[in-house]
Image: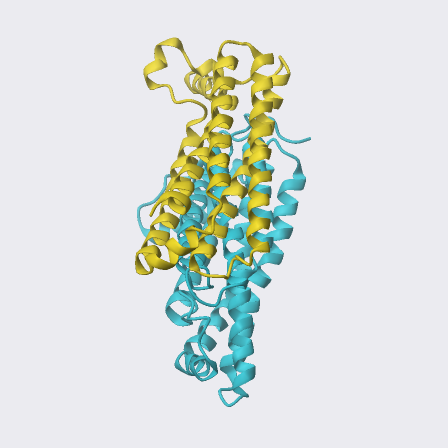
Amino acid sequence: MTDAGAAADCARFAPPDERIRPGDAAHYVPGQPDMWVFVLVEALIFASYFVIYMLHRVQDPALYLRSQERLNAGLGVTNTLILLVSSWFMARCVQSSRERRYDVAFRQVLFTMVLGLLFIGFKLIDWSRMVSEGLELSTNEFFSFYYFLTAIHVLHVLIGFVFLIVAAYQLRSPLRRSQEIVETCATYWHMVDFLWVMIFALLYVIR
Amino acid sequence: MRAVAVQAAPVLPSGLFERLAWHWRYNPKLEFWIAWYSMVFFYNLFGVVFVGMTRVMPPPQPWWDTPRVVQWFNDNHNGLLVGFGIIFLVSGLTAACNALIGYSMRRMSVSRAFAYSYIAIYSVSALPGMLLTAIALTVGAMRPERDPELIYWLYDMGFMCFVGTMGIFLIGTLVWMIAILIDKNRVLPKWFGYLNICNLITEFVVATSWVFKKGVFAWNGAIAFWVDTAVFAVYTVAFIYLLRKMIKREDFGDGPLPA
């Protein structure tokens, strides 16, 4: 390998944080750009779900309106607030980590996790209440979409816990603490929040 | 690898057959390219057979009654027999794909267990994901005079195997994803590691086809089939392209390999 090639490889394999220079601020993407590719693909997939949902909704709006009234809007709003606050904690965590206040950042990622668990807890309560009222996956088309969209979202939240644990693991030891990885994990968590806001609007709010 | 032979290789000739002969004799990555082209050939043939010949993709309606299902078998009699005959003949080519993906993990800074478990999982997955479908539908098409209820049974079995048995792919995808994301040698880009999450989630989505016979969540539904297939197509094109890039790379060995 030539010297130039070796130098290029050294630059490529350098730890991510060392590749970011102050002058690059204008081109700076939080976290790994790879995660943003994933966010884009996920947004496209969910957009296709939403379009399909809306196409079915316009065919029988009365059924969807009647079914929507059976949802517990209070729990929906509570869960939305919980996820928004969790996202806020995650944003604070990234900021704390940038300021090298790692203990604070670690606590903030733990708060995010607790709120994520609370979200899932409320979702389970909501599902069990609905099932006990006889509102199941195959009750009608609206509830099929409801269970599908909320379950797929919960799956994303569960995957999100892996990212939060990775962020906590990074923040815990001075030997790790990659700002890029913390930001990548935060990006995923914000996507989970963003998707929920869309799902909440479509299932609970839209009339 | 035939690294010694390549030093003495003459200049690449211009004619097609001469070039092929040159590659056969001197290309140090010949085995990789054979595996890669086998994979491309297999996926193309898979598309031709499943879409064009057997009409299994897109799947027909799950809610059809018995006479309509029997008619479907009669309409596609020759396509099913010839098409799946071809699939039985070439199904072993999936090994080339598994080998290349397994090899990608052997270049990574991760345990060998990843490559071995991936190869084991995907070797088994050809059975529920492709061969059982092919066997059930071939048996259904073989004797048109068979009891229609039995043909109906084979129809359900064929399509539920094809669309609904994705759990095994899920674990295989998970193994590759984790390997890519924790690898330090950058054999495959991280964005592809994350793209595995999309493919993995589609395996959950198809589970709805076990519940619904009609609508977007049925085995031919807009969500359970079309969106999932679109994601799988993007995923497949991405990994075929990335495996090609991996073969072309010359900087293997720069990073740490497992002991």
Residue A171: image location, x then y, percent: 59, 18
Outermost bottom residue: B145
Residue B21: image location, x then y, percent: 42, 51
Residue depicted at x 45% and y 24%: A31
* Up/down of A172 relative to A145, above or below: above
Rendered image coloring scheme: by chain
The picture's colour for chain A is yellow
The one nearer the camera, A103 or B69, is A103
Residue A177: image location, x then y, percent: 57, 16
The one nearer the camera, B47 or A127, is A127
Residue B11: image location, x then y, percent: 37, 39
**Which picture quadrant has residue A28?**
top left
B31 sits left or right of A121 in the view: left
The one nearer the camera, B13 or B57, is B57
What chain is colored cyan?
B
A6 sits left or right of B105 in the view: left
Q: In which quarter of the image is the C terminus of chain B?
A: top right
Can I make out residue A45 in this image? no
